[in-house]
Image (cartoon, rainbow, N blue to C red):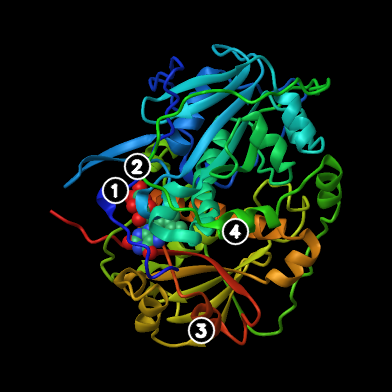
Amino acid sequence: MSPHHRYDPMRNPLPFKIYEDLDPIPLSLDVPLTGVPALSAIATHVSPTPEGQVPDIAAITRILHFSAGITKKLRSVRGDMPFRAAACTGALYHIELYLVCGDLSGLDAGVHHFDPGESALRLLRKGDYRSALVDASGNEPAVANAPAILVYTDVFWRNAVKYQAREYRHAFWDSGTIIANTLATAAASILPAKVVTGFVDDSVNQLLSLDAQREVALALVPIGYAPEVITGAPPEIGPLELKTTPVSDFEVDFPAIREMHQASSLASRGEVVAWREELHANSVTATSVPLIPIEPQAPGALPTDPVETVITRRGSTREFSRDSVTFSELSTILERASHQIPADFLAPQGDALTDLYLIVNEVDGLRSGSYAYQRDGQTLELIREGEFRPEAGQLALGQALGADASVNLYFMAHLEPILNRLGNRGYRAAQLEASITAGRIYLAAYALGLGATGLTFYDDAVTDFFSPHAEGKSAMFLVAVGRRTRRR
Ligand SMILES: Cc1cc2nc3c(=O)[nH]c(=O)nc-3n(C[C@H](O)[C@H](O)[C@H](O)COP(=O)(O)O)c2cc1C
């Protein structure tokens, strides 16, 4: 971090990408809601059916709006501040969404940009360009049969204005919380969806005509299933001369962001295919210590608030009350959020890349202390019993939210074997896996009437705190859960 960089919140970049000369294709938010309970949607995997599952404009609108749309506006000294469906560091909203689709009911084939400000699409390229993404993804099957593919990009400066080069991490944190919403809303719409992180970076950036010095593609999520595979050579893709509104009257370059991204980029189809072939199941760490089985609520007893209601209700908790949550609530969150993410970096039955560690401050029915969660057996391993509220606050950058929460959930990754197996791209995958699961934790907490917030943390101190158990692991994401202080 440069001590010379000054952050002035009054000079935040515009949180929207606006194509000035393109007409909006309005997306009516008057779409039917699925009514599917959030706690079911976050844990559901929809498989393709032989007859196909093709989204129409209503399903596309629902998915875009409940992923990255504006769900509320709050009064602030700077006027009405729009907040979005998913949590985002600093509320700076640096992740953009694009839609690449064939002809859908209510929407023509094209490469579109999603504008959450106006709830509209703008057509960047007319025609069916999906084969360009099939090619860039090395024929990833979910992309090859997708009627529609979402592309998530990161505009560096919009977050670097505050966080400098750390923005690169936030790119994955903040796209992950959005993707958690995408997966849940797609599942509620009975549409298959999968996170695809292996693709030729330049090809995807060129398709969207991004200035890759400032904005890059991070992930693809193919939506739906069409029985016919997309075939044919990718169309000719030239640069687009489209005017966008400048987001800021000043901009500082942080070359480390570009260098980190370049170091994990894939340059050819061959590289993408070879990268994906490296996938095989992780080894499971056997443990002989006593394990505590989690006790999730029975499926029939779960709250049934629909996914759309819960996403709209979600917000990052600003103050926790220090009241306890129950072991059953914590167990439900762990069980619901930990279902395997459909992703190209995970073998179908493979283990997750990240491990979940907990600091339990106040959970009825569970002794306070630090724990490791074993997803496979759905058990908690007590690492150290004790009252760790001060430590939890300290690790979370000295913020009271960490101390006051009932439980702090840390995602940790043993990066060395991940990088050995998946190359530098493994860093992107580990960050995304953590943030998508954390996004599900946000939704599970709010579905249960609890609060949650992402928090920043002191990396090395977190590893030390959970060591020797977490020796060699790096902290990826922190989400704190508890009861919200009721304000009048
Ligand atoms: C990865 C991540 C880290 C965050 N870190 C902090 C934090 O350290 N302190 C804090 O008060 N809020 C933190 N937040 C919450 C954001 O400030 C919040 O998401 C943003 O203001 C948007 O508001 P909303 O989540 O209520 O929609 C974090 C959110 C995310 C996703």
Dividing the picture into quarters, in which one does residue 479 lie? Answer: bottom left
Dot 1 or dot 2: first in sequence order is: 1
Compared with 311, 349 (above or below) is below
Q: Could you say where residue 58 lies in the image, as x and y percent from the top left?
A: 50, 20
Which residue occupies the foreground of this view, 224 or 294?
Answer: 224
Q: Could you say where residue 164 lies in the image, as x and y percent from the top left?
A: 45, 60
Which residue occupies the foreground of this view, 172 or 44?
Answer: 172
Q: Which numbered mark, 1 or 2, is in the foreground of this view?
A: 2
On the image, numbered disc 2 is attached to which residue? Answer: 249
On the image, numbered disc 4 is attached to which residue? Answer: 431
On the image, numbered disc 3 is attached to which residue? Answer: 465
Q: Could you say where residue 86 lies in the image, as x and y percent from the top left?
A: 43, 45
**Label 1 SS:** helix
The kind of residue on which mark 2 rests is: Asp
Dividing the picture into quarters, in which one does residue 229 lie? Answer: top right
On the image, numbered disc 1 is attached to which residue? Answer: 11
The kind of residue on which mark 4 rests is: Gln
**Mark 4 CB in 8 Å range of ligand 1?**
no
Dot 4 or dot 3: first in sequence order is: 4
Dot 1 or dot 3: first in sequence order is: 1
- Whether pointer 1 and pointer 2 mark residues with C-beta atoms closer than 8 Å, the reply is yes
Residue 19 horizontal side relative to residue 282, left or right: left
